[in-house]
Image: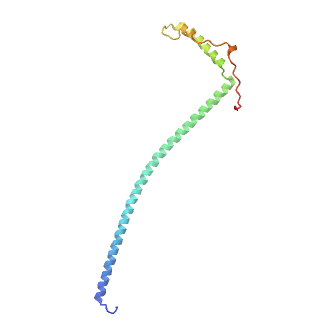
Amino acid sequence: MPPGKRRGDLDTELAAERSAAGGDMDEVLGRLLARATQAELRSQQLEQTLARVNEERVVLEARLSELVRQLEDADTSRASLEAQVRSTGQARRSEGPVTVAYVRSMAAELVRALDRLAPLRGNAADPLTPRAISDLPTPRPPSLTPTPRPRSDRPRR
């Protein structure tokens, strides 16, 4: 025992220190409890956010798979159309280029066919009466038809 202090004084001082330390301990425990509560709330918020993100991911994956399916369908359709164009292009090359004279002769043939059908129809309100057909332009003779220039595969300069 230090000189000048009695046992009662030491007990009183010890009790004061314990109460001060106990108060500090209560304060520390209160802070820890508050932080634990905040951490728990934050954890719940993160769990809710994660659940929303997972739901959105499922929706986006479904949309992505639908878009991939549409893309594959479009690719298949494109390939089919390309094959049709190639086969039509090859048939066209064997037929030769379409000329204005050819189109005119086809139009004249169509007019002649309409002339043959017009008397058979007999409908006065029909616009394809012989007079209406005769008003159509007649094809030019082949000598007046311009001859198309042959096309080449070379690019123009």
Quarter holding the C terminus is top right
Q: Where residue 64 sits: x, y (%)?
A: 50, 44
Task: Give above or below for 84 relative to 99.
Answer: below
Figure disc tally: 0
Can you name the residue that lies furthest to the front here? 157
Q: Where residue 58 sits: x, y (%)?
A: 46, 47
Can you name the residue that lies furthest to the bottom here? 3
> Which residue is painted at 63% across and 18% down in the image?
103
> Which residue is painted at 34% across and 69% down in the image?
30
Quarter holding the N terminus is bottom left
Q: Where residue 2 sits: x, y (%)?
A: 34, 91
> Which residue is painted at 44% across and 51% down in the image?
53
Task: Give above or below for 68 relative to 44.
Answer: above
The quarter holding residue 21 reads bottom left
The quarter holding residue 154 reads top right
In this image, 141 relative to 116: left or right?
A: right
What's the image's color scheme?
rainbow
In this image, 45 relative to 86: left or right?
A: left
Task: Give above or below for 58 relative to 14.
Answer: above
Q: Where residue 102 sits: x, y (%)?
A: 65, 18
> Which residue is painted at 55% across and 39% down in the image?
72
